[in-house]
């Protein structure tokens, strides 16, 4: 059975005091909760929180993730942060290719795979995001779009690819209040797994964890997570409230 993942992407929210308060609330709630061992919980805050949260999370069930790294190891890149830098403050996961960065920072395929390779060198697990826009879905191109986005990874060898997590985020359901139905999510997750199987074989495809990221909330999380190919969630807005995030964690823990 694949180990489920619930990852909270705080995006550009929370000053340091607010972030510490949120993280403490989540940690304290989980202390009194029975959680399956086959569940990873990750907090993905802005860079300013990473060092403080590294200390706070050390004796907890939570891991630490970063929202981005630069494609180069080091150098004259003012305002950027490298994979080795985030590793030094306890980061074990990192987002790559989130739809917002694809749109606002115009991240290219070459840049995305370079970031993945930087993370692999530092033994940081990349959470590689794929997803289609509303226009692409309405024109029936959603599966083609996802296949093209995944193909960026297909020069990786089997060992490196096996260390990735994929996150399916229907762009039309991020921050819009719309949510893909659980059947729509399952259909796309199964498509992603099939594309991976076609490239790397069924044994690797069966082990890759695929997260749903599109307005996952306490009231729909259990149904989404119960689907065969949905291995957890990349949570946005609901991760900014401790009670809501803990309820989603509970949904993942109880959906085995």
Image (cartoon, grey):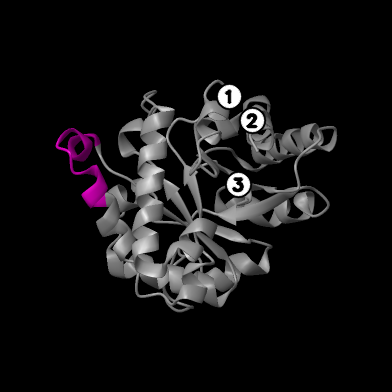
| Mark 3 / mark 1, whichever is N-terminal | 3
CB-based contact (under 8 Å), mark 1 and mark 2: yes
Q: Secondary structure at mark 3?
A: strand
Marks 1 and 2: which is nearer the front?
2
Mark seen at residue 5: 3
Magenta residue span: 134-145
Magenta stretch, main secondary structure, is: helix
Q: CA distance from mark 3 to mark 2?
A: 11 Å
Q: Which residue is mark 1?
A: 218
In the rendered image, residue 135, in percent from the top left (x then y), is placed at 18, 36
Mark seen at residue 27: none
CB-based contact (under 8 Å), mark 3 and mark 1: no
Q: Secondary structure at mark 1?
A: loop
Quadrant in the rendering for residue 196: bottom left
Residue 141 colored in magenta in the image? yes
Q: Residue at x 65, y 43 (%)?
A: 16
Q: Residue at x 48, y 78 (%)?
A: 73
| Mark 3 / mark 2, whichever is N-terminal | 3
Q: Quadrant of the C terminus?
A: top right
In the rendered image, residue 82, in percent from the top left (x then y), is placed at 51, 70
């Amino acid at each position: 059975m694949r180990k489920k993942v619930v990852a909270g992407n705080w995006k550009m929210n929370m000053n340091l005091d607010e972030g510490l308060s949120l993280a403490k609330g989540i940690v304290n709630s989980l202390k009194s909760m029975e959680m399956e061992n086959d569940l990873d919980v990750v907090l993905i805050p802005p860079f300013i929180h990473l060092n403080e949260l590294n200390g706070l999370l050390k004796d907890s069930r939570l891991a630490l993730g970063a929202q981005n790294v630069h494609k180069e190891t080091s150098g004259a890149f003012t305002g950027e942060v490298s994979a080795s830098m985030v590793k030094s403050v306890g980061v074990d996961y990192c987002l790559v290719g989130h739809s917002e960065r694809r749109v606002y920072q115009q991240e290219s395929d070459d840049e995305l795979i370079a970031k993945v390779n930087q993370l692999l060198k530092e033994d940081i697990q990349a959470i590689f995001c794929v997803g289609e826009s509303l226009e692409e879905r309405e024109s029936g191109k959603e599966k083609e779009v996802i296949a093209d986005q995944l193909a960026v990874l297909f020069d990786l060898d089997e060992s490196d690819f096996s260390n990735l997590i994929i996150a399916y985020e229907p762009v039309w359901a991020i921050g819009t209040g719309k949510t893909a139905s659980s059947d729509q999510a399952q259909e796309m997750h199964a498509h992603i797994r099939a594309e991976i199987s076609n490239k790397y074989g069924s044994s690797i495809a069966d082990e890759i964890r695929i997260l749903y990221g599109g307005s996952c909330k306490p009231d729909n999380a259990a149904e989404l997570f119960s689907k065969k190919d949905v291995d957890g969630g990349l949570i946005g807005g609901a991760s900014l409230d401790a009670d809501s995030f803990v309820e989603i964690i509970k949904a993942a823990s109880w959906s085995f």
